[in-house]
Image (tube, rainbow, N blue to C red):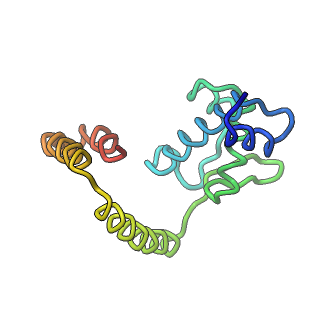
Amino acid sequence: QQPCSEREAVSDSSHSETPQSKQLRDIAAERLRAMIAQGKLRGGQWLRQAALSAELGISYTPIREALKQLEAEGLVEHVPYRGVRVVAFRPDDILDIYAIRLVLEAQAAASAAQRITEADLAILRELHERMCQLHGPESLAEVRELNER
Protein backbone atom coordinates (compact mmCIF):
# COMPACT_ATOMS: atom_id res chain seq x y z
CA GLN A 1 0.00 0.00 0.00
CA GLN A 2 1.15 3.55 -0.80
CA PRO A 3 2.18 5.95 1.96
CA CYS A 4 -0.63 8.27 3.02
CA SER A 5 0.79 11.41 1.41
CA GLU A 6 1.29 9.61 -1.92
CA ARG A 7 -2.28 8.22 -1.85
CA GLU A 8 -3.64 11.71 -1.20
CA ALA A 9 -1.57 13.19 -4.03
CA VAL A 10 -2.83 10.56 -6.45
CA SER A 11 -6.45 10.86 -5.33
CA ASP A 12 -6.38 14.66 -5.67
CA SER A 13 -5.27 14.45 -9.30
CA SER A 14 -7.28 13.47 -12.35
CA HIS A 15 -8.39 9.83 -12.63
CA SER A 16 -6.21 9.23 -15.70
CA GLU A 17 -3.03 10.36 -13.95
CA THR A 18 -0.85 7.55 -12.64
CA PRO A 19 1.78 7.99 -9.91
CA GLN A 20 4.47 7.61 -12.59
CA SER A 21 2.98 10.32 -14.83
CA LYS A 22 2.59 12.58 -11.78
CA GLN A 23 6.27 12.08 -11.02
CA LEU A 24 7.23 12.81 -14.64
CA ARG A 25 5.04 15.94 -14.56
CA ASP A 26 6.84 17.13 -11.44
CA ILE A 27 10.24 16.40 -12.98
CA ALA A 28 9.27 18.26 -16.17
CA ALA A 29 7.88 21.20 -14.19
CA GLU A 30 11.03 21.44 -12.08
CA ARG A 31 13.30 21.34 -15.12
CA LEU A 32 11.22 23.91 -17.01
CA ARG A 33 11.12 26.13 -13.92
CA ALA A 34 14.93 25.95 -13.73
CA MET A 35 15.27 26.72 -17.45
CA ILE A 36 13.11 29.82 -17.00
CA ALA A 37 15.04 30.91 -13.89
CA GLN A 38 18.37 30.44 -15.67
CA GLY A 39 17.20 32.40 -18.72
CA LYS A 40 17.37 29.40 -21.06
CA LEU A 41 13.68 30.00 -21.74
CA ARG A 42 13.10 33.73 -22.08
CA GLY A 43 10.06 35.91 -21.49
CA GLY A 44 7.78 35.86 -24.52
CA GLN A 45 9.29 32.66 -25.90
CA TRP A 46 6.74 30.19 -27.27
CA LEU A 47 6.98 26.69 -25.82
CA ARG A 48 6.24 23.81 -28.17
CA GLN A 49 5.37 20.50 -26.54
CA ALA A 50 7.19 18.48 -29.22
CA ALA A 51 10.44 20.39 -28.74
CA LEU A 52 10.19 20.26 -24.94
CA SER A 53 9.40 16.55 -25.05
CA ALA A 54 12.47 15.88 -27.19
CA GLU A 55 14.75 18.11 -25.12
CA LEU A 56 13.65 16.73 -21.74
CA GLY A 57 13.16 13.14 -22.90
CA ILE A 58 9.64 13.10 -21.44
CA SER A 59 6.43 12.27 -23.31
CA TYR A 60 3.78 14.85 -24.22
CA THR A 61 1.28 14.19 -21.42
CA PRO A 62 3.61 15.00 -18.49
CA ILE A 63 4.91 18.02 -20.46
CA ARG A 64 1.34 19.27 -20.97
CA GLU A 65 0.55 18.77 -17.25
CA ALA A 66 3.80 20.51 -16.25
CA LEU A 67 2.88 23.50 -18.42
CA LYS A 68 -0.52 23.67 -16.69
CA GLN A 69 1.27 23.65 -13.33
CA LEU A 70 3.64 26.44 -14.44
CA GLU A 71 0.66 28.41 -15.74
CA ALA A 72 -0.96 28.16 -12.29
CA GLU A 73 2.31 29.46 -10.81
CA GLY A 74 2.30 32.41 -13.22
CA LEU A 75 5.49 31.46 -15.06
CA VAL A 76 3.85 30.68 -18.40
CA GLU A 77 0.62 31.74 -20.03
CA HIS A 78 -1.72 29.90 -22.36
CA VAL A 79 -2.78 32.00 -25.34
CA PRO A 80 -5.90 30.54 -27.01
CA TYR A 81 -5.28 29.22 -30.54
CA ARG A 82 -1.55 30.07 -30.22
CA GLY A 83 -0.01 27.95 -27.51
CA VAL A 84 1.97 28.50 -24.33
CA ARG A 85 4.68 31.09 -23.80
CA VAL A 86 6.96 32.17 -20.99
CA VAL A 87 5.61 35.19 -19.12
CA ALA A 88 7.65 38.32 -19.76
CA PHE A 89 8.14 40.06 -16.43
CA ARG A 90 8.22 43.85 -16.26
CA PRO A 91 11.12 45.51 -14.41
CA ASP A 92 8.76 46.39 -11.53
CA ASP A 93 7.75 42.71 -11.25
CA ILE A 94 11.40 41.68 -10.98
CA LEU A 95 12.07 44.30 -8.29
CA ASP A 96 9.05 43.04 -6.33
CA ILE A 97 10.25 39.44 -6.63
CA TYR A 98 13.71 40.33 -5.33
CA ALA A 99 12.26 42.39 -2.47
CA ILE A 100 10.14 39.41 -1.40
CA ARG A 101 13.09 37.01 -1.78
CA LEU A 102 15.22 39.29 0.38
CA VAL A 103 12.74 39.07 3.26
CA LEU A 104 12.08 35.34 2.87
CA GLU A 105 15.73 34.39 2.53
CA ALA A 106 16.67 36.47 5.59
CA GLN A 107 13.98 34.69 7.63
CA ALA A 108 15.09 31.30 6.30
CA ALA A 109 18.74 32.04 7.14
CA ALA A 110 17.83 33.14 10.67
CA SER A 111 15.77 30.00 11.20
CA ALA A 112 18.51 27.76 9.79
CA ALA A 113 21.16 29.43 11.96
CA GLN A 114 19.16 28.53 15.08
CA ARG A 115 18.93 24.87 14.07
CA ILE A 116 22.30 24.20 12.41
CA THR A 117 24.40 21.28 13.63
CA GLU A 118 28.16 20.72 13.50
CA ALA A 119 27.60 18.20 10.68
CA ASP A 120 25.64 20.83 8.72
CA LEU A 121 28.45 23.34 9.27
CA ALA A 122 31.01 20.85 7.97
CA ILE A 123 28.96 20.35 4.80
CA LEU A 124 28.61 24.11 4.31
CA ARG A 125 32.34 24.63 4.79
CA GLU A 126 33.11 21.94 2.21
CA LEU A 127 30.69 23.47 -0.31
CA HIS A 128 32.21 26.91 0.30
CA GLU A 129 35.73 25.56 -0.26
CA ARG A 130 34.65 23.95 -3.54
CA MET A 131 32.97 27.17 -4.71
CA CYS A 132 36.08 29.22 -3.88
CA GLN A 133 38.11 27.00 -6.22
CA LEU A 134 35.84 27.77 -9.19
CA HIS A 135 36.59 30.77 -11.37
CA GLY A 136 35.22 32.37 -14.52
CA PRO A 137 31.99 32.08 -16.48
CA GLU A 138 32.73 28.48 -17.48
CA SER A 139 32.24 27.50 -13.81
CA LEU A 140 28.87 29.21 -13.40
CA ALA A 141 26.81 26.03 -13.89
CA GLU A 142 28.84 24.18 -11.28
CA VAL A 143 28.58 27.08 -8.82
CA ARG A 144 24.79 27.10 -9.30
CA GLU A 145 24.64 23.35 -8.75
CA LEU A 146 26.67 23.60 -5.55
CA ASN A 147 24.56 26.53 -4.38
CA GLU A 148 21.38 24.47 -4.77
CA ARG A 149 22.64 21.90 -2.27
| 81 vs 15, nearest the viewer | 15
Residue 79 in the image, given as x and y percentages of width and height: 76, 54
Residue 149 x, y percent position in the rendering:
34, 43
x 63%, y 26%: residue: 58
In the displayed structure image, the side of residue 18 where residue 25 appears, left or right: left
* Quadrant of the frame with the N terminus: top right
Q: Please give the count of numbered marks on the rendered protein.
A: 0
Q: With 113 as the anchor, is 122 left or right in this view? A: left
Determine the image quadrant of residue 23: top right
Q: Residue drawn at (52%, 71%), measured in percent from left and top?
A: 93
Q: Quadrant of residue 25?
A: top right
Please, is residue 116 above or below residue 11 in the view?
A: below
Q: Residue 65 at what x, y percent from top left?
A: 73, 40
Q: Is 118 on the left-hand or right-hand side of 27?
A: left
Q: In this view of the protein, which residue sits in the foreground, 146 or 10?
A: 10
Q: Give the residue displayed 27% in from the left and 43% down from the top.
A: 143
Find residue 81 and report its horizontal and vertical position in percent.
Answer: 83, 48
Q: Which image quarter: residue 64?
A: top right
Identify which residue, 134 or 118, lies in the foreground.
118
| Rendered view: 47 above or below 42 | above
Q: Residue at x 50, y 75 (%)?
A: 92
Vertical comparison of 138 with 109: above or below: above
